[in-house]
Amino acid sequence: MKLIFEKSVPGRRCSILPRCDVEEVQLPQELRRQEAPALPELSEVDLSRHYTELCQHVHGVNCGFYPLGSCTMKYNPRIDEEMAALPGFAGVHPLAPEHAVAGCREVLDTASRYLCQITGMDGMTFQPAAGAHGEFTGVLLIKQYHDARGDHQRTKIIVPDSAHGTNPATAAMCGYQVVNIPSAADGCVDLEALKAVLGDDVAGLMLTNPNTVGIFDENILEITRLVHEAGGLCYYDGANLNAVMGIVRPGDMGFDCIHMNLHKTFATPHGGGGPGAGAVGCKAFLEPYLPQSAILSEGEHLQVRAFNGNFLVVVKALAYLLTLGREGIPEAAENAVLNANYLMRRIQGTFQPAFDRICMHEFVLGLEEFKKETGVSALDVAKSLIDRGIHPPTMYFPLIVHEALMLEPTETESRETLDQAAEVFRQLYQLAHTDPETMRTAPHNAQIGRPDEVQAARNPILRWQA
Amino acid sequence: MKLIFEKSVPGRRCSILPRCDVEEVQLPQELRRQEAPALPELSEVDLSRHYTELCQHVHGVNCGFYPLGSCTMKYNPRIDEEMAALPGFAGVHPLAPEHAVAGCREVLDTASRYLCQITGMDGMTFQPAAGAHGEFTGVLLIKQYHDARGDHQRTKIIVPDSAHGTNPATAAMCGYQVVNIPSAADGCVDLEALKAVLGDDVAGLMLTNPNTVGIFDENILEITRLVHEAGGLCYYDGANLNAVMGIVRPGDMGFDCIHMNLHKTFATPHGGGGPGAGAVGCKAFLEPYLPQSAILSEGEHLQVRAFNGNFLVVVKALAYLLTLGREGIPEAAENAVLNANYLMRRIQGTFQPAFDRICMHEFVLGLEEFKKETGVSALDVAKSLIDRGIHPPTMYFPLIVHEALMLEPTETESRETLDQAAEVFRQLYQLAHTDPETMRTAPHNAQIGRPDEVQAARNPILRWQA
Amino acid sequence: MGSYVPSTPAQRQEMLEAIGLHDFRQLYRDVPEEMLLRDGLDLPEGMSELEVSRTMTAMAARNTAYSAILRGAGAYDHYIPSLVKYVPAKEEFLTAYTPYQAEMSQGILQSIFEYQTMICQLTGMDVSNASVYDGATAAAEAAAMCRDRKRRVTLISAAAHPDTINTVRTYCYGTGDELRVVPVKDGRTDPEALRQMLAGGDVSGVYIQQPNFFGQLEEAEALGEIIHQGGALYILGVNPIAAAILKTPRDCGADVAVGEGQPLGMPLGWGGPYLGFMATVQKHMRKLPGRIVGQTVDSRGQRCFVLSLQAREQHIRREKASSNICSNEALCALTASVYMAAMGPEGMAEAARQCLSKAHYLAKALCAIPGVSLRYPGEYFHEFVTELPRVPEVLEALEQHGILGGLPVEGGILWCATEKVSRAVLDETAAVVKEVLSK
Amino acid sequence: MGSYVPSTPAQRQEMLEAIGLHDFRQLYRDVPEEMLLRDGLDLPEGMSELEVSRTMTAMAARNTAYSAILRGAGAYDHYIPSLVKYVPAKEEFLTAYTPYQAEMSQGILQSIFEYQTMICQLTGMDVSNASVYDGATAAAEAAAMCRDRKRRVTLISAAAHPDTINTVRTYCYGTGDELRVVPVKDGRTDPEALRQMLAGGDVSGVYIQQPNFFGQLEEAEALGEIIHQGGALYILGVNPIAAAILKTPRDCGADVAVGEGQPLGMPLGWGGPYLGFMATVQKHMRKLPGRIVGQTVDSRGQRCFVLSLQAREQHIRREKASSNICSNEALCALTASVYMAAMGPEGMAEAARQCLSKAHYLAKALCAIPGVSLRYPGEYFHEFVTELPRVPEVLEALEQHGILGGLPVEGGILWCATEKVSRAVLDETAAVVKEVLSK
């Protein structure tokens, strides 16, 4: 595909703005830029066709199966988009006076009520713009809490080695030393390892439950109790909340604060990499530390971005929450778990689950043996799925499983889709035994073959140049 | 692709309506249908994916080049869609009281003013829903006119043999006997042939100018004078108006009434086969006969459909008209003609234009010689274009050119697009000489190969059945 | 100032020169000099996108926005699911032409084939076309379909929509055929009058609307028997929402089922674009006007879809064609398909039941007000006529509440309630009417 | 009652049985019994789509709709071309995840690569990332980027947006680094104070906003010289519309250019989603946080695009990463690209000139009113502060005219005019202010 710049023709343009209807003013010479920015010059028909061409080479969850583990790629409802596009929401200035934004307040208040109820928390902020941003906010709450008590010796955050990379990165951004503790074989917390590191230098623990291999940690009450006893707080990484929402609440597991990815659990679209929204909830004693906008509020507060956050994303999430309601929320969780177990069981017999037990909303295949047998890697299987119209699972994560493929079908896939996917896996399993070379060079029907990522990193070309 | 019915699962559904909030009423048994209609049962995710799959197998003009002769496939601007979707237009009931529809009236009045100015007519109706419907309306005006004068012996309508098939069909729908007159070699009216059929039994003439081979009839004033002298009226088929709008006006050519295809000349999208809008204009003396809605007006009037016509299509056309304005309208015409001539000249040397002269907005290639030479037909060339991402031209029309391919690039194609298309034609010309078989079996890269149309007609399967 | 011409002025000049010309006017050398528009169009300058948006948004704002609509009479305010608005707006569907090239248009062709099937399933008929312009023209086309050399008279019920009657009349005027109107008795087509009008043996087809213009449910099956006894064909115009629960046209004996498809997901849009649907039984298949999509196989043996039975159409038959229709309402047909699929059989029936229930709720609430009564005694679906005094004041008062009341008809009001109207609005309406009438 | 689970209850039961279970609760057997939510969620029942639409449309209607907006202060009401709204709403772009699988995501990857290039062209910098959350976090990320072991202090101008200052302060609080605020003199960053604050040699980076919060244009080049003389890196926060005509960050000597991308086609949306853009010079390329797309070739030798330089990112570096950002604002970046491409170089410059001209027109009209004067003497772009009495009454009166007036700031008003506001509205505004002040 040509780049948009390669379609540019000097002097070509769209007619967007009228002539200026007031006297023209010029900037003083010394403040002016020397020449107009070299943006592409195109007509509207060129633009329309360019972006149509690009979108034909994108696979969204509304277009097909997308079992990308830990990303909760559930269907993104159309009504949510329609609600967020209402001029009554989309056209509101963030600094409009309070009496003019009663509807926006109602959105945040209602969403907050739903999410507090789901998580078992007391307060909620929508300022964080993404999951990692929410983690950052959550750990800052912990830091503020200790600081406010003058408890300054707490310099460590405990993170299991099975955690997402954002957890340790977040702790570091908050100035904490990261203490990695090894997980048990099933990815659950090793209680002895935990006890060994707990002490009065521990600010808190970051944990996701169900964990990254899709297993619910049975010892969760004991874990949070131990951390609290040591004076630390417990942070819940909401990445896997879809498995348990409406069934069991992080607040009841003993967690003090939590972030959620509205663009995963609450069905707002991810836009090819954002915008998301990382709502953060906390127990009442942490509420005073929730972030606020400086320009919108009095007093000193933490603040992690301007204004009130990705508001229109919250509108979408609220439309989803209102739709599901008290029965729909646990129904979604139960069916996410059912779908994961069903797909795992259907695949079993060919590729092997890393853990042979009931899983939560996702499961991990370990392809180490398979690779030894056939020479076909997890990557090769992933790329072969592309040829068959299925987005590959998460590859090589979690780190504790070798040749891992992590599948999360979500509740919005039908039995038929799962059956078809299982059939594709079965075919690939056989193909690996009969024609491994085809898989090692996949994809064959995609727009491109495998990209040379090494060259991309070694000799970075990060922009087009004429 | 599976049909939507083949994806249906009993009991599957979307959640659109709430429970009924009033007491439920039942129809009497004798009025009730025996079972619910066997519509497909799907979830929203199924539907979203189904229609995404379908739309991936459609080529629209906003997606790529579409030089379908006589169809004026110009770019359909986005702002026009946005305006038509405004709740202030889309939500208006057709029987809302007059004081509540001032904005709708303004749309029709403004569009009428623009179109009267462009066509040289005095009055306009937007009731017709498509071009052929406009033809029907226009010829009914002629019929009403003669009937009102008690001039009942006029039973014939003259139609040149190069005319679109709708012209004779329309005349027949209006109860007229169709008199076909032969065209001159260039598709223009043969004055002698015309004179020969004129008389007091002629109700009128239906003509398009420029004609269907893309040539402006120099004798147009003489033609309309002759018809008027014989007591007939002249009807202008606006199919080719895009060539001359803002340059020369049908009213000034001597025509009494005209239909336009808003979905061609005025950039409203054609939706895969409608809705269009067939605005009909007329001189002042025909205005009393313009159609009206019975429920919206007093007195007896013709009426060709309910209410005021495809109003939201008129909104789109008005947005386009306002955008172009006094200079933009002739600019569009001039560039439509320029693009046709440029493309014809670029292709010339391989495929031969049927008429070697300056054309109007479209031109016809005659492939009779080429076919003798290579065995490759106009159809084969058309199908080979599909493999190269170009929608085929109109095939085998007009009937007066053998192995015709009729190309109308329109003004919204850039020079680059025309150059690329010319290059594709050049390649196909060569391919026909080196590998005709590949062309005779084209397309090869499309979703389907050539369909068996004979079987479709002989053994019609017009609906899915379980 | 707006322009959609992409080539730059410099390119245009080069292109002119490439064809051996120097300026644009030379392109028009065939046009007699004296005819050229010398002073240009007497129109305003072109506008930028921002100005167009500002101008037309201001026009739209000049229309009154109602928060609830209790008016039907041929156009119905149903809830349109979000997906139903989104799918037909995809520019692939939106900006394609009629699918002449099957290899490049399978998406459209399949969508129409699916539409045809759904219309058959809704009406119980065997064959549907790809759509016509609207319900009124569907009736007119059906009347033309029914005509043969001997029988040239068409009958239409006086309880049909006035625009339908007038449109059919106009089409008959075109071909020089006669239209006669069957009178109404107690708000429904008078069966005795119908029987008498058929007695002459010159009637080709009879059009009955179900529910009729007054909202009344016709005895459609009984009327069908009378029509067939008279040797004519039976055209039944049906509301497609009502059709989800009403006895099907097939079961009522209809030869042709037609209707206005607007309730199937199209916005009110001040009257259009709407959708005319037409379906018939197997034996009249080749008389059905307009485009039809058929299933076949391609050169590789795959199932695929094409425009079919084109021998019936105007571009082949020219003056022998019985209809000139080519462009129809394909995108509206797609809209209707998405609507029917999103609602599903249960959702369609539920929508119909809620219309029925809410209309009856409203009628009861209104008729509890002194001075208000039902005009007709028969069963009705989602429309009904009340007698009441002070109609203009009632409608004016409702307008003050943001409610578009029913349509004034000869001293009464034709009300309509759909599933979209909440009970609260129905209660509010009754309260407003009560207040006005008690003044 | 709403549900997006497609499998029917019967299918779910079969699926449960296929995995050897009988009911859903058995799926949660690892969860300690006492923790299960026994009584379910204390929330309302689910809603149908119609109810959600009705409920949320009512919420939206509770906000005030202004016909014109003269308030900026970090969020700007520009005209959004229709295409700019349409393209990012395509569900392929909308519903994809981060493009981890390049073979299935070239459309997104290429769009980001194009965005990166446009940001470079707008700012004059060499390298852009794929976006961060907003302008405030872009400033905070840039401050982190500039820090090294020795220099840990960040400076920020007091004329920066209050939310930017507070966000940078919060990020500094996280890492335990110090933020100091450079004072303002006559509405602009005080160069002398800046010079003195750099004297200690402990400053890593200095953030200046152009135009600043008060709308004033900073002497950005001169400030850059002072900053570099002080051994610090220069972070320049720029308004992307102003950037089309203002001296580029590169020409002002900036090491990192950042900004709030909302003016590039994003709706006001009560504050989000917005777009943080970040660009830097070649030598700091590997310090740039967040996603970056790079060009490479595929196995067939074709040009293609991938997420690149991932060794910098959190999933590789874990606790050694300097930022944890992964999801960014990709769809907003696409929106900005479509906006910049639709406007083109000339359209961007025209928008900027119209903002400039209209703001000056408004300022002149307001300052012609007795009692109104400009607070600051310097050059400004599209925002300016007036001194005037009776601020609440003025804003209230404008609101009666459907106009959202400027932001009240310490006894004055910070006004903003964009290309979207017509001269008529500016005149109306001045007339309203005049009337209030003459009472």
Image (cartoon, coloured by chain):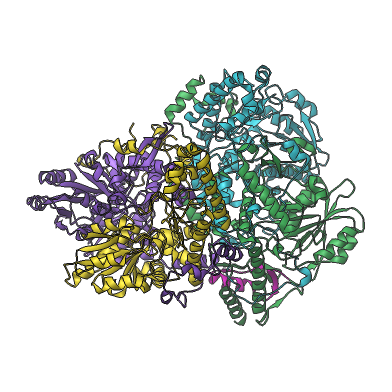
Chain colours: A cyan, B yellow, C purple, D green
Of residue D390 and residue A174, the one placed in the foreground of this image is A174
> Residue B255, percent across and down?
33, 70
In the displayed structure, A357 sits above or below B435; it is above
| Residue B372 horizontal side relative to residue A80, left or right | left
In the displayed structure, C312 sits above or below C54; it is above
Which quarter shows the N terminus of chain D?
Answer: top left
> Residue D278, percent across and down?
73, 52
Tell me the magenta residue range. Answer: D380-407
| Residue C43 horizontal side relative to residue D77, left or right | left
Query: Residue A157 lies in what quarter of the image?
Result: top right
Q: Residue furthest right?
A: D200
Of residue D2 and residue D304, the one placed in the foreground of this image is D304
Of residue C234 and residue C434, the one placed in the foreground of this image is C234
Which quarter shows the C terminus of chain D?
Answer: bottom right
Q: Is residue C306 magenta?
A: no
Q: How many marks?
A: 0
> Residue B277, percent across and down?
37, 59
In the displayed structure, A218 sits above or below C372; it is above
Residue D412 visible in the current orientation: yes
Residue B41 visible in the current orientation: no
Of residue B267 and residue A360, the one placed in the foreground of this image is B267
> Residue B215, percent across and down?
41, 63
- Residue at 36% across / 72% down in the picture? B253
